[in-house]
Image: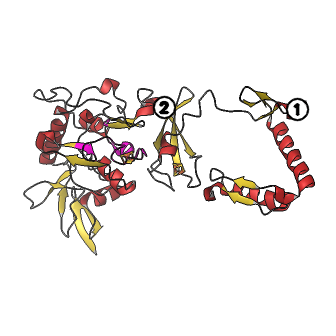
Amino acid sequence: MTLKITIDGIPIEAEAGQSILQVAREHGIQIPTLCYHKDLTPTGNCRICVVDVAKQRFLQAACVTPVWDGMEIQTHSDRTIHSRKLTLELMLANHPQDCLVCDASGSCELQDLAYDYQVEVPKWGSKGNRYQSDSDPNPFVRVDFNKCILCRRCVLACAEIQVRNVWGVAYRGFDEKIVAGSDTTMLDARCESCGQCVAYCPTGALSDKMSYAKGRTHQVSKVKTTCTYCGVGCQLDLNVKDGKIIGVTSNPDAAVNGMALCVKGRYGYDFIHHPDRLTRPKVRRYLLEGGQKSRQGSGWDWVDTDWETALSITANKLLSIRNSAGPDSIGILTSAKCLNEENYLMNKLARQVVGTNNIDHCARL
Ligand code: SF4
Ligand code: SF4
């Protein structure tokens, strides 16, 4: 059913069931938000998106108020601006003023809104930190609830996207806060360290521990790539600073996974610059230089070589095994980390080149 409404005096057609915010955004009309995220159920918590609706006594939260026929909405009336400023002031009164050293500076939605509305910390606010920073032993997620604005995006991201229900809201009034489980640690509350809650946090309350203090949004270049760990093929942004990957962030335009990543895709990148990482193929020395198989200490005597040599040795070995013991003495295991196309080629290698049906995949082990 089509409804006729006006937003800021502009006549607009909307569909029944749409929220004011949805209709406004579809028509390029900006209404500020903090707790709202398009991927999550709107809750109307933060009151930043309040708008003036004709004949309504109170301001309405645009994210949760459905449009009705004949609705007249003002998005930037004097009293909406006054209300947003007051809400921001209340948030800042309770928020540490450490933007100079905060990892989220430059990507913090609270900081941007305070700037847009020119709101400063009220003189009666800022009584110091109430919580210990870096308060949770989770190895990947850094928790600093001094910076939490109780928007509950982390609660929803964990519940609706990762379906782990780690975060909740506890206590009342000034003591209200986000807690893991029944106010325990994240891991005790069944967290699987996917970092979804970090990705949706609009401030620096939840951040990536591995990237902490290594570089802020405006200091890194983002390189879109595909996760190498499994066949889902999630897309993500590598955050690169001075030629080094210092973190991974969600790419909201990723077709396969949206903002979602698992612990491997989001935090399993430290091998890339690890000094023990193999960057060249290795073969046992006797295969290159002849002689007997030998050990060095507790391991085989490996030497670096080039791909051409390593692949020739492998092919010759497979050929000699097939010739002496038959093709079914060889089995090939492929990997979920390969592309479908690579797995298909391994199937061809097994059946048509080697001549065996002994081909399987690590996902079935
Ligand atoms: S890291 Fe993932 S599982 Fe853990 S609390 Fe955050 S969203 Fe939930
Ligand atoms: S982020 Fe996780 S689910 Fe996505 S491709 Fe990587 S390993 Fe697979």
**Quadrant of the snapshot with the C terminus:** bottom right
Q: Is mark 2 within 8 Å of ligand 2?
A: no
Res 244 seen here? yes
What is the three-letter code of the residue carrying label 2? Val
* Residue 138 quadrant: top left
1 is higher (above) or lower (below) than 140 = below
Circle 1: residue type: Gln
In the rendered image, the residue lying farthest to the right is 323
Q: Which residue is mark 1?
A: 292
- Tell me residue 178's x, y (percent): 24, 43
Q: How many numbered discs sit on the rendered protein?
A: 2
At x 88%, y 58%, the residue is: 326
In this view, which residue lies farthest toward the front? 298
The majority secondary structure of the magenta stretch comes to loop
Which residue is more in the foreground, 242 or 32?
Answer: 242
Above or below, 138 against 170 in this view is above
> Camera-side residue: 342 or 335?
335
